[in-house]
Amino acid sequence: MLSRVADNLYWMSRYLERAEHAARLLDVNLNLMLDESTSSADRRWKRVLAALGNPPNLAWSGDAYQVAQILTFDPGNRSSITACVAAARENARQVREEISSDQWQRLNHLFHQVTRHKPNETEDVLPSDFLLAVIEGVHLIQGVTDSTMSHGEGWHFIQVGRYMERACATVTLLGLYHREFWGHPDQTPEAAEYLEWVGLLRSCTAFEAYCKVYTADISPDRIIEFLLLNPEFPHSVRYSIDHLQRALDAIHGEGGKRRGAPLTRLAGRLQASLSFGQISEILSQDVGAYLQDILRQCRDIHETIYQLYVDYAIQTALAG
Amino acid sequence: MGLAEISRFDHPVLQDYLVDDAYDETFESPGKPRPHYAPLLETFSSLPADEIRRRKHSADLAFLNQGITFTVYGRDEGTERIFPYDLLPRLITSAEWTRIERGLTQRITALNLFLRDIYHEGRILSDGTVPREIVYSCKHFRRQMRGLQVPRNVYVAVVGSDLIRMPGGEFVVLEDNLRVPSGVSYMLTNRRVMKRIFPNLFRKQGVRPIEHYTQALLSTLRSLSPEGRPEPTIVLLSPGVFNSAYFEHAYLARQMGIELVEGRDLVTHDNVVYMRTTTGLRRVDVIYRRVDDDFIDPLAFRSDSVLGVSGLFNAYRAGNVTLANAFGTGVADDKALYAYVPKIIKYYLNEDPILNNVDTYLLTDPVQRQHVLQNLDKVVVKAVGESGGYGMLIGPHSTAAQRQEFHDRIVADPRNYIAQPTITFSRAPCFIDDTLQPRHVDLRPYVLFGDKVTIVPGGLTRVALRRGSLVVNSSQGGGSKDTWVLNQ
C-alpha cells in the first residue's frame, strides 16, 4: 500500500474519532451545566477546552453557549467538530479508490449534514440534537467501514488511527479530572463532585458499563481503574491499546517482522504495563506523571509508525 | 406506434427536427432513417415519453452514485457534476469502422516514425518535406529528447484522435491528441450504464464490445517495459484530487489493478524511480502519466511545479523507467504541423492517407495569411498549442470586435495560429425537452500503440448540446453519447 494512502486512512479515522469525542464532551457538559452555579461553570469550561487541547484563538469568555457554538460550527477553528469532519472527508477524498463507496457516501453525507447546518440564532437551546446526529453519523461510518471494507492493511491503519485517538482522549480526560477532583478518594463524593465524576464516565460513554461492573456506587479510584484498565470496555485505555497493538501486528505481518521490531517493542511494552498493572500500585505513585507517561508513549508509537511506514528516509529504506 | 410513424415529420418527438446542409447520422433524407438505425428508432418510438424520462433519470442516478463525475472548479465544497450525456446512441457501421481503424493505424504509425526521426537524424527536416522552423518553434518540442532511445521506438502509446464527418459523409481527422488524451472512462461507463438501461437494444443491434480497453491498455504499457524488467511494476501518475479528470485516473487505475500515484509518492535514487509504500520503497518500471510535460519534473522542466518528481527525467534518460506517452510528443499534435501529416504519412509509409485532413491555412505563409485575414468571418482560427476548445475564433458566429482582436493577434504572432474553413460537421438526434433535436457531434476513438496497435471498436461521441453550436468540449458545454460499432 502506498504510504500516502496509509497516512490518509490513519488521519481520516483519527479526525472522525476526534469529532465524535468532541461532540460527546460538549453534549455532556452543556447538560451538566444546567444544574450548577456560574462559579463552577468557569472551571468546567476551562477543563473542556483543556480536554480538546486548548484550541488556539479560543479563550474562555464566560459564555458557555458561545464557546460551544465555536467548538461545534466554526470551520476556521481546527478543533471544531465541523473542521474535524471536513478534515476526515478531505483525507477520504484523496483515497476514494481505496475505501468502499458505502463508506464514502456515509462520510460525504455527514459532511454535508455538518456544513449545511444553520444554527438558529434566536433560540438558545442546546445544539443537542445536532451533537447526537454527529455521534450517530460517526457510528454509522464505523459500522459501514467494518462491514464493507476488506479487513486488510488499509482497514488496520484505520483501526490504528481510531484507537490511538481514543486512548489519547481518555488519558487526557483522566488526567484533568484527577488533577481537579482527586483529594479524598476514600470518601463518598459530595453532590457536586459526584456529578463531575459521572460526567467523566458519560464523556467516555462509560456510565452504564461502569454500573454493570461496580453498580452505581461512584468512587473515583474505581472510575480510574475502569477507564484505565478494564479489558472489555471499548473506550478504556487498555482496550484501545490492546486493539492498537493488534492492528500494528497485522500491519507488521505484511512488511516482515524484523522491520517492525521497534514498533512491536513500544506498543508491546505499553500494552503489557496496562495488562499487568494494578490500580493500587498506580494510585500509590504520582498518577499525573503516570498518565503523562502513557501519552508520551502514544506519541512515540505515532512517530515510530511514521518513521517505519510513511515518512522513512530513502537511504535507510534502500539499505534495508 | 411503429417506425412508419416516427418517420413522419408531424410525429411529436420529431417536430423540432430540421434538416440543413450538415450530414445527418440518422436520417438519409427528411423522414427516411438510415437502415442501420431502424431497430433503434423502432425501440425508441415504442416507448412513451414518460418511460424515456424514467430511464434517463435512472441512468443519471447510476452515474451519480458510482461517482462518475467531474469536478467543477472554484467552489470549496468540492462540487461534483455528472458529465451530461444523451440516451440515443450513435451508430457506426462495420464498413465505416474498418476504414477508421485502418486510417488511424496508418496515422499513428507515421506519427511515431516522425517523432523518432525529428529527435534523431531529422531526415524529414533535411529533405525539406517538413520545414525545420515549424518543429523547432513549437513550444512542445523538447530538445532534451534528442538522441534518446525509447522502448520499441514508441513515443505515443495512447492516442485520442478527434474525427468529424464532412457534409458528404466522409470521416476526416480534425485533431490528433498525442499528449495526455482523456475521456476514455466516459466511453467505458456510458456503455455500462446503457447496457443496464436498454439491454434489449444490444441484442437487436449486434454491438461490438469495448470492455477490454483497460486490459489492452495494461498490456500495451507492459510491452513498453524497460529491458530486463519482465515483470514490470506499472503505475498511473495523476496530478491529484484537484484535477478535473481525477475520476478517470482513479477509474483506470482500479480497472487495471495498478497503483494510482501522485508526484509526492515517487522518489528517484541513482536514476531509479521508486514509490513509497508501507512495506518500503518499491521500484517503478512503467509510468502511465496523466501529468503534462511541463509539470512532470521540476529539475528538467518547470521548476515551480509541485506535481512532479525530481530526477524523473534523468531516470528516463538512463532507460530505467518508461513513460507513456514519452516527453515531447506534443510537437506532433501542434496544429500547424497537422497540415503536414498527409505528407508525413506519404514520406514514411509511401501510402496515401486513408483518413484525410481538414484544409488548413498556415498563417506564416504571407499569401495564405492575407487570404485568411480578409475572410475572418468565414473561417475558424485556432491557437496551435491549445486544446479543450480554448483560444478559438469561429468566424460565422463572431462579432466584429472578436475578429479585430484575432486579426491583431495573428499579425503579431502568425506562427501561433492556424485557420480552417468553417465545417458544419455531422449531426445526430438527441433527446432534449422530450423531443428529438439535431446536435453536432464528433468522434474520439482511442488508439493504443505498443507491441501492436489496438483500437477498441467505439469511442467517445461528443455532442455540442447548445443548439447550433460547433463546440463539443466538456469544458464548453459539451455532452456525450454512447458509440456503438455494429457487427454489420
Image (cartoon, coloured by chain):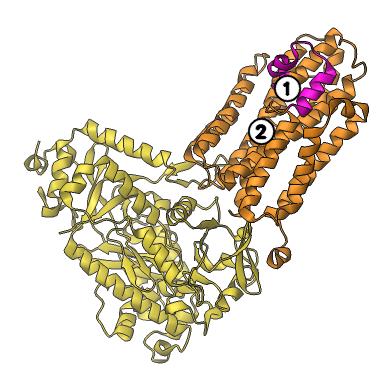
Would residue A225 be counted in the magenta stretch?
A: yes
Residue B119 versus residue A92 in the image, above or below: below
Residue marked by disc 2: A17
| Residue at 90% over, 11% down | A187
Residue B278 versus residue B16 in the image, above or below: below
> Is residue A54 in view?
no
Q: Nearer the viewer, residue B373 or B364?
A: B364
| Chain B drawing hue | yellow
Q: Nearer the viewer, residue B425 or B93?
A: B93
Part of the protein shown in magenta: A202-230
Q: Which amino acid is tagged 1?
A: Ser
Q: Which amino acid is tagged 2?
A: Glu
Q: Quadrant of residue B396?
A: bottom left
Give the chain letter for orange: A
Q: Pointer 2 indicates a residue of which chain?
A: A
Q: Which mark is residue A203?
A: 1
| Residue A158 screen position, x and y as percent | 62, 41
Classify residue B290 as left or right of residue B303.
left
Q: Earlier in the sequence, mark 2 or mark 1?
A: 2
Classify residue B256 as left or right of residue B27.
right
Q: Pointer 1 indicates a residue of which chain?
A: A
| Residue B223 screen position, x and y as percent | 42, 71
Q: Quadrant of the C terminus of chain A?
A: bottom right
Mark 2, secondary structure of its residue: helix
| Residue at 17% over, 65% down | B95
Give neighbour class at mark 2: few <14, some 14-19, many 20+ (Cα, 10 Å). Answer: many
Most prominent secondary structure in the magenta stretch?
helix
- Distance from disc 2 to disc 1, alpha carbons, whole Å, reads 13 Å
Would residue A226 be counted in the magenta stretch?
A: yes
Classify residue B50 as left or right of residue B446.
left
| Residue at 44% over, 59% down | B390
Q: Are marks 2 and 1 in contact (CB under 8 Å)?
A: no
